[in-house]
Image (cartoon, rainbow, N blue to C red):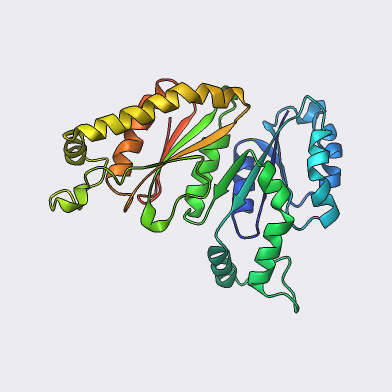
């Protein structure tokens, strides 16, 4: 049976992820005491629960500190029939603070002695073990609720477990490198379509921008080198039991060069891998293979 453990800091979107997995056919439990995980999995392996895709449980800072320290041991002791993975959601402290201020909800660790920023920092320390052991980390700082639901469906929705689930993501360096990126490539060395007035309002998805970039030999060499590296080493990542990988391509604004290269890589990787998604962070679009 498939088990997804959802964790992360409060305000990062755990409830949204849990609801999305419920829509995907998982039996979902929120705020489960970590010590009860073996009992839950044993019960749900019974015949009457076989119709569910798997189990999704949210285990976070609402657990006791002792249970959080023991969670790795608890997961390791689960039966071999349980295929477990950890999904960890997080966001920048300023974003989490803003979300709590907007919703006026109380942070689980905030009280008369600890301010909201202090509670957010303390939560990071308490969940360090889960974040380090996570199979998939998603930074929701720049994601809307709908973006997160789409990403959960794209990355966890497929029942196929063959190979690595790839996400090719374009971004703009002016807004920072995606914190969940595994491989980062900098496309700012290529000619910038921004300085061509007729190309400035377009994106790397437009033919005119593609033709401009392809007219420069270094673009094709750059894309070719990245493609060869990925095709050469992705099988090795898969053999190392890697489940998810995010390949991030950045340029200055995340509108032209990075988008074009991400689109090109996505089309190439689709031919060799069955589980590939494409996201343009600055354009807020997500495509699933």
Residue 198 higher or lower than 78, as above or below:
below
| Residue 58 in view of the camera | yes
Indicate left or right for 276 with 135 as reference.
left
Which quadrant does the N terminus fall into?
top right
Tally the numbered discs: 0
Q: Quadrant of residue 73?
A: top right
Q: Residue at x 32, y 37 (%)?
A: 261
Residue 168 higher or lower than 34, as above or below:
above
> Depth check: 227 or 265 in front?
227
Residue 76 percent location from the top left of the image: 80, 34
Q: Residue at x 65, y 65 (%)?
A: 120
Indicate left or right for 176 with 59 as reference.
left
Q: Residue at x 16, y 34 (%)?
A: 215
Residue 201 percent location from the top left of the image: 20, 52
Residue 70 higher or lower than 219, as above or below:
below
Residue 168 higher or lower than 31, as above or below:
above
Which quadrant does the C terminus fall into?
top left
Residue 186 percent location from the top left of the image: 36, 44
Q: Residue at x 82, y 32 (%)?
A: 78
> Depth check: 263 or 212 in front?
212
| Residue 273 in view of the camera | no
């Amino acid at each position: 049976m498939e088990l997804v453990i959802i964790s992360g800091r409060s305000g990062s979107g755990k409830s949204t992820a849990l609801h999305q997995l419920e829509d995907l056919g998982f039996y979902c439990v929120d705020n489960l005491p970590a010590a009860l995980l073996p009992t839950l999995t044993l019960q749900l392996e019974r015949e009457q629960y076989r119709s569910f895709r798997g189990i999704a449980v949210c285990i976070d800072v609402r657990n006791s500190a002792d249970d959080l320290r023991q969670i790795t041991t608890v997961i390791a002791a689960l039966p071999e029939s349980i295929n477990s993975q950890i999904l960890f959601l997080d966001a920048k402290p300023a974003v989490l603070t803003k979300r709590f201020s907007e919703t006026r909800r109380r942070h689980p660790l905030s009280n008369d002695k600890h301010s909201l920023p202090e509670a957010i920092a303390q939560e990071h320390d308490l969940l360090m073990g889960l974040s380090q052991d996570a199979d998939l980390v998603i930074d929701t700082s720049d994601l809307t609720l709908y973006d997160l639901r789409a990403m959960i469906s794209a990355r966890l929705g497929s029942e196929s477990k063959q190979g690595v689930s790839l996400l090719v993501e374009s971004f703009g360096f002016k807004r920072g490198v995606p914190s969940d990126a595994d491989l980062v490539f900098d496309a700012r060395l290529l000619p910038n379509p921004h300085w061509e007035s007729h190309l400035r309002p377009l994106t790397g998805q437009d033919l005119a921008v593609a033709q401009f970039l392809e007219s420069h030999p270094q673009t094709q060499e750059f894309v070719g080198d990245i493609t060869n590296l990925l095709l050469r080493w992705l099988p090795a990542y898969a053999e190392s039991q890697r489940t998810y990988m995010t390949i991030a391509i950045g340029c200055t604004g995340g509108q032209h060069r990075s988008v074009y290269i991400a689109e090109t890589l996505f089309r190439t990787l689709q031919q060799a891998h069955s589980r590939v998604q494409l996201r343009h962070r600055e354009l807020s679009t997500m495509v699933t293979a």
